[in-house]
Amino acid sequence: MKHESESRALDHLIAGNRRWAEGSVREDPAFFRRLIEQQAPKYLWIGCADSRVPANDIVGLLPGELFVHRNVANLVVHTDLNCLSVLQYAVDVLRVEHVIVCGHYGCGGIAAAERATPLGLIDNWLRHIQDVAERRRAVLARERDPARRADRLCELNVLEQAHNVCRTTIAQDAWRRAQPLSVHAWIYRLSDGLVQQLGFTAADASDPAVRLASAVERIEARAQRG
Ligand code: CO
C-alpha cells in the first residue's frame, strides 16, 4: 500500500525520536514531567530556517529554555503576523527578557538576494534583504571581494532586523511599562560553530536608530581595514 510505504520512509526518524526520548529520561528521569508543568524561557531566538543553524544546540539550551522563531534569513518584517505573534507572545505572555536576532555567514537567503536570480514567491521575501543592501550600499561597496561583501551583508541584515524588533509596538510597549527586555544582534559562523555579537544591544526605548548607526559604523570600519 502506498500509504504504508510512505510512512515507513521516515522509520529512522521515529526510531531516532524513541532513542532521544529514552536517553533524555535515562539522564534525567523528571525531564518530561517537568516540561509539561510549564515553559518559562528567558530568551526568544529569531534565527534563519537554515538546517545548519540549530538554535538550542548552538547556545546549549534544553527544551523549555528557548522560545524560537525561524524564517529564511532571520527577517523581522513589520507586517509579518507570524513573527510579530511569536514576539508578542514571547514578550507579553512568557515575559522573555532577551530577544536574540541571530543571522549566519554563508546564508543562502542572503546569497539568493544578492544574485537576484528569479526563484518564485520567495523573491518577495528576499526583497527585504535587497532593501538592506540598497540602504547600505556605501558600506558594501568598500568590500571588493564578493565573499567578504556577502559576510558584511549578513551582518548588516542582522542589525537591521534587530533594529526592527526595537521599533515594534511590542518592544516599545514593554519598555514603556519598564518591563526588562533586551534586544541583541548576533551572527553565527558555520565553519567554527561560534557566535559573535555585532555591537547592538538595546535595553530601552532610547532611539534605536542611533544604536543601529553606530553598529553599522563599526562594520564599515572593518570593511575599510580588510
Ligand atoms: Co540562512
Image (cartoon, rainbow, N blue to C red):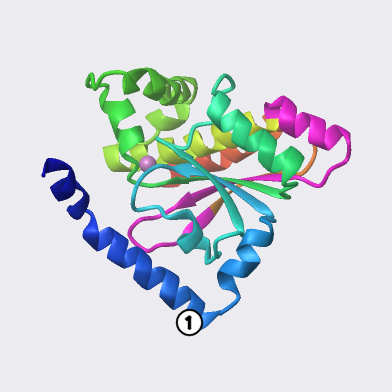
Which quadrant of the picture is home to ligand 1?
top left
- The amino acid type of the residue labelled 1 equals Arg
| Residue drawn 69% across the image and 55% down it | 42
Q: Nearer the viewer, residue 188 or 33?
A: 33
**Residue pushed farthest bottom?**
26
Is residue 175 rendered magenta in the image?
Answer: yes
Q: Nearer the viewer, residue 127 or 54?
A: 54
Q: Quadrant of residue 162?
A: top right
Residue 38 spot, x, y in % from top left: 68, 57
Residue 15 spot, x, y in % from top left: 29, 66
**Residue pushed farthest right?**
177
Q: Which residue is denoted by mark 1 in the rendering?
A: 26
- 91 on left or right of 194: right
In the image, which residues are magenta? Answer: 167-196
Is residue 41 rendered magenta in the image?
Answer: no
- Residue 212 visible, this orientation: no
Count of marks placed on residues: 1
Residue 187 spot, x, y in % from top left: 48, 49
